[in-house]
């Protein structure tokens, strides 16, 4: 257990509204990641962070932004939610000698 | 074409059977290979981690990597109903830097009592 808490766990929102998902970790890990999981696609990387204020894009970053103002918190923002962003979002941190990624429980987002 | 291909199943087998799960990949730079298990409505959890070609065993689970064929497998012996989950293969190129993981689609497995 890498001490990852995602909030909210479930959210329903309307098209065009901004949405922010939070990932909180208690282990002081340097790297944090945001993924989305959709049927037929497995997990795809949205953005990742390698330190406070240090972030970079992943495979499916369009329509998403991230921020990391503290080591323990990594925020994912959907600037103007669309139905195509309905998905399950997972946060992960990386730890250990083998740099294993550990995942949170996920946030289930529905955009209507 | 996806970098990592995994048969999504679903796969249903009787309790006690040997299960074989497989992934193929196209990127020859992948060096590190993982299998994650994901129960319904939960986050993925690491099951097996291997580097380069060969076999690795952990209890009832064996991970196999064949880099020449770009093919990895996970074998589950004496399968139990508690093994029912989605199994995701994942791989990465490097042990340095961002270490982005590329996942397969996941295979949904059901073990019937």
Image (cartoon, coloured by chain):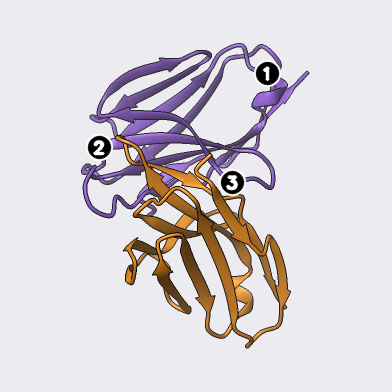
Chain colours: A orange, B purple
The answer to whether marks 1 and 2 mark residues whose Cβ atoms lie closer than 8 Å is no
Q: Nearer the viewer, mark 3 or mark 2?
A: 3
Query: To which residue does mark 1 refer?
Result: B80
Q: Is A30 rendered above or below residue B60?
A: below
Around disc 3, counting alpha carbons within 10 Å, would you say few (fewer than 14), some (14 to 19), or many (20 or more)? many
Residue B91: where, in percent of width, then height?
Answer: 35, 42
Dot 1 or dot 2: first in sequence order is 2
For disc 1, the chain is B
Q: Please name the residue that numbered disc 3 is placed on.
A: B43
Q: Determine whether, in the image, residue B34 is placed left or right of residue B44.
A: left
What's the CA distance linking mark 1 and mark 3? 20 Å
Work out whether disc 1 and disc 2 sit on a shared chain: yes
Question: Where does the image place residue B61, in percent across and percent down from the top left?
Answer: 50, 18
Q: Residues within 10 Å of mark 1 (few under 14, many from 20)?
A: some
For the residues labelled 3 and 2, the Cα–Cα distance comes to 24 Å
Residue, disc 2: B31
């Amino acid at each position: 257990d890498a001490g990852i808490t995602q909030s909210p766990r479930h959210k329903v929102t309307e098209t065009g509204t901004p949405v922010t998902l939070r990932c909180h970790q208690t282990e002081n890990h340097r790297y944090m990641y945001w993924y989305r999981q959709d049927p037929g696609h497995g997990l795809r990387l949205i953005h990742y962070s390698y330190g406070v204020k240090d972030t970079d894009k992943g495979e499916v970053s369009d329509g998403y932004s991230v921020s990391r103002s503290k080591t323990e918190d990594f925020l994912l923002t959907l600037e103007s939610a669309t139905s195509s962003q309905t998905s399950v979002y997972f946060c992960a941190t990386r730890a250990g000698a083998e740099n294993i990624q550990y995942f949170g429980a996920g946030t289930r987002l529905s955009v209507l | 074409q996806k970098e990592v291909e995994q048969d999504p199943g679903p796969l249903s087998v009787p309790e006690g059977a040997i299960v074989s799960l497989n992934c193929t990949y196209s990127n020859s730079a992948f060096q590190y290979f993982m299998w994650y298990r994901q129960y319904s409505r939960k986050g993925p959890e690491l099951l097996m981690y291997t580097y380069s070609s060969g076999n690795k065993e952990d209890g009832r689970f064996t991970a196999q990597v064949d880099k020449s064929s770009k093919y990895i497998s996970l074998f589950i012996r004496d399968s139990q109903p508690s093994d029912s989950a989605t199994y995701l293969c994942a791989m990465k190129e490097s042990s340095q830097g961002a270490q982005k993981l590329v996942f397969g689609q996941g295979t949904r497995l059901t073990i019937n009592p």
